Amino acid sequence: MNAAPPDRRIVLAVAIALPGTGHVLLGQPARGLGFALFTLSLGWLSTKIAPAEASFLLRHAGAALVWGLSVIDAHRIARILCIRAKNKQSAAFL
């Protein structure tokens, strides 16, 4: 029998703390590394493209976008794994 997936609230908190770590917690380290690298690269690129008088958020818009997508994706995967685990558990009782 497979181990229970991590609690999706914990995955959400970890994903908010650092991009890609939620995926690592879910057992998808390559996907997490991809999100982390894209966050860094788009953050760097947006700081080079944005004008000097731009706000902090605008200067780091690329990183914020990918980081937000990473959080959403990690929570979505955790929710799916939780539903699958519940379905397997209920099917075992039948």
Image (tube, rainbow, N blue to C red):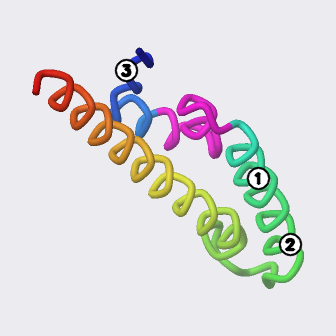
Residue at disc 3, secondary structure: loop
Displayed quadrant of residue 20? top right
Front label number (3 vs 1): 3
Residue 4 numbered tag: 3
In the rendered image, the quadrant that contains the C terminus is top left
Q: Amino acid at mark 2?
A: Leu
Along the viewing direction, whichever of 46 and 13 lies nearer the viewer: 13
Q: Look at the numbered disc 1 and give the secondary structure of its residue.
A: helix
Crowd tier of the residue under label 2, counting other residues whose Cα lies within 10 Å: few below 14, some 14–19, many 20 or above: some
Q: Nearer the viewer, mark 2 or mark 1?
A: 1
Q: Label 2 belongs to which residue?
A: 45
Question: What's the CA distance linking mark 2 and mark 1?
Answer: 16 Å
Q: Which residue is mark 1?
A: 34
Q: Secondary structure at mark 2?
A: helix
Image: 52 above or below 44: below
Would you say 71 lies left or right of 49 here? left
- In-front residue for pair 50/78: 78
Q: Is residue 78 above or below residue 27?
A: below
Quadrant (top left, top right, bottom left, bottom right) of the N terminus: top left
Q: Quadrant of residue 55?
A: bottom right
Q: Residue at x 68, y 44 (%)?
A: 32
